[in-house]
Image (tube, rainbow, N blue to C red):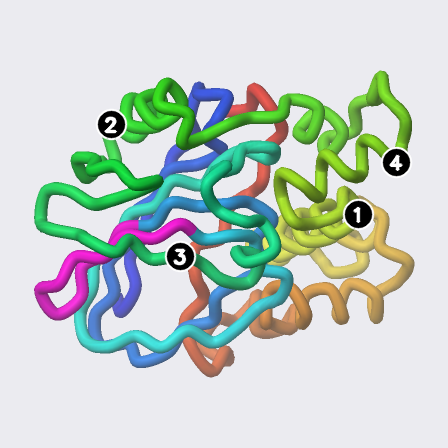
Amino acid sequence: MPIESEDRPSDSRYIRRVWRGRASGVERMTSIATSNWELVFWEEAGVVHAAARGPETSASAAELTGDSTSFGITLAHGVSMPHLPVSGIVDGGVESVHVTERSFVLAGEEWELPGFDNAEQFVEKLVRAGALVRDPLVEEVVWGGVARVGSRSVQRRIAGATGLTAGAIRQIDRAREAAILIEAGVPALDVVHRLGFYDQPHLARALQRFIGRTATQLQNPARAPQPLSLLYKSEGPGAS
């Protein structure tokens, strides 16, 4: 297969998902929207890279050059990096200024490159060093909790931690869940009713904007113009 990937849940309050992948013989892929920050590490043409990436508010085409391997830590909602301005990382990212086969620089310090199996230990080190912070209210509100502070204050805290509104986060994650259901063979009309879309055109617009696919292409991947990036359900806090 041109793109192979796997992912796993995490019991860390700071991590939503851990994933890794390999691409071979692929020049372009569709990168789907995501509402979370990520730490991403990849090797391409023998060169190792590391970057912090912010939420992506729409699907986009990503260029691939040759064979590559990648590994990522998708952070929980409300987890951010104080040294990076939120406004500059949404729909973008910041690549490490110095990366070797064993280490990289983040927040002005050198860190050992983490792996798929020790992501939690690595994130814990970042937390202790103050390179990662978490606002628990953000995840609570995003997943339907009732905030104990005023709505304007809540929206400021969500935007300050994620760069997005709570509504935008829910729209992105609902589209991702819809894509998973359609890939699994659930009829589009059932997805509309199950996830609260107004009608099938509303679902179609969400899929095109956030996933970069039509329902037909999700049901029949061979009809899609290029491979799709990793797609997994955005479980709520404590899910596994």
Residue 13 image offset from top left, x and y in percent? 50, 21
Q: In the drawing, does residue 62 fall left or right of residue 211?
A: left
Q: Is residue 151 within the magenta segment?
A: no
What is the span of residues highlighted in magenta in the rendered image? Answer: 41-52
Q: Name the residue under label 4.
A: 152
Q: What residue type is labelled 2?
A: Asn
Looking at the image, tell me whether mark 4 or mark 1 is earlier in sequence order.
4
Residue 205 image offset from top left, x and y in percent? 76, 70
Q: Identify which residue, 22 or 184, lies in the foreground.
A: 22
**221 versus 134 height, above or below:** below
Residue 77 image offset from top left, x and y in percent? 60, 35
Instruction: Identify the secondary structure beneath mark 1.
Output: helix
Q: In which quarter of the image is residue 222?
A: bottom left
Q: Is residue 45 within the magenta segment?
A: yes
Q: Which amino acid does label 4 sit on?
A: Arg
Residue 118, numbered circle: 2
Q: CB under 8 Å between callouts 1 and 3? A: no
Q: Mark 1 points at which residue?
A: 167
Looking at the image, tell me whether mark 4 or mark 2 is earlier in sequence order.
2
Residue 94, numbered circle: 3
Q: What residue type is labelled 1?
A: Gly
Quote the CA–CA distance across marks 4 and 2: 38 Å
Mark 4 closeness class: few <14, some 14–19, many ≥20 residues within 10 Å: few
Instruction: Identify the secondary structure beneath mark 3.
Output: strand
Quote the CA–CA distance across marks 3 and 4: 29 Å
Q: Say which residue appears at 35% left-offset and 40% top-offset.
A: 107
